Amino acid sequence: METPRSYPAGSAAAQYHASIALNAAAHPSTLTPVPMSTPQQQQQQQQQQHRQQKYVPVVVPSFLRALILFTMSIAVFCIGIHWIFISKLLPPSDDELLSWVRKDRYYGALLPLLMPSIVVFVFLNWLGMKYFRHN
């Protein structure tokens, strides 16, 4: 057990310890230890709190996100197919963007040529994660 320290009268430390002593004298119940609850009691408390909460499953936003993702992927696919194949078959246009897409050779070949390397790197990423988890 620690021996009580003496602090200079009027110092902040002396005032702090005096306030603790006054608080302890005024409220002796605050110093009584609270019994620890058993794991079964904790589980019952958690179940009771869970029952009191209103659980509403969130279905609409995830469905909406999936619909948006699906729509965007279809749009990107259609634009890519038009860019790579269809625009080369169309007659020349007065629009600068359409004529640039029609004359383009780099970006039209970029995506099809990237697919094999993307597949290889995705596979290597998956394989590395398998080695990491099971090693």
Image (spheres, grey):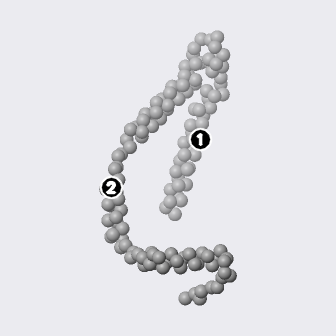
* Residue type for callout 1: Ser
Taking depth in this image into account, of 100 and 2 the one nearest to the observer is 2
Q: As displayed, is residue 55 above or below residue 72? A: below
Identify the image quadrant of residue 49: bottom left
Q: Which mark is residue 8?
A: none
Q: Which residue is mark 2?
A: 52
Q: Secondary structure at mark 2?
A: helix
* Residue type for callout 2: Gln
Taking depth in this image into account, of 42 and 68 the one nearest to the observer is 42
Q: Which residue is mark 1?
A: 117
Q: Secondary structure at mark 1?
A: helix
Residue found 35% across the figure and 53% down from its top? 53
Residue found 57% across the figure and 16% down from its top? 89
Residue found 31% across the figure and 56% down from its top? 51
Taking depth in this image into account, of 128 and 96 the one nearest to the observer is 96
Q: Position of residue 21 (x, y in %)?
A: 53, 79
Q: Position of residue 84 (x, y in %)?
A: 57, 24
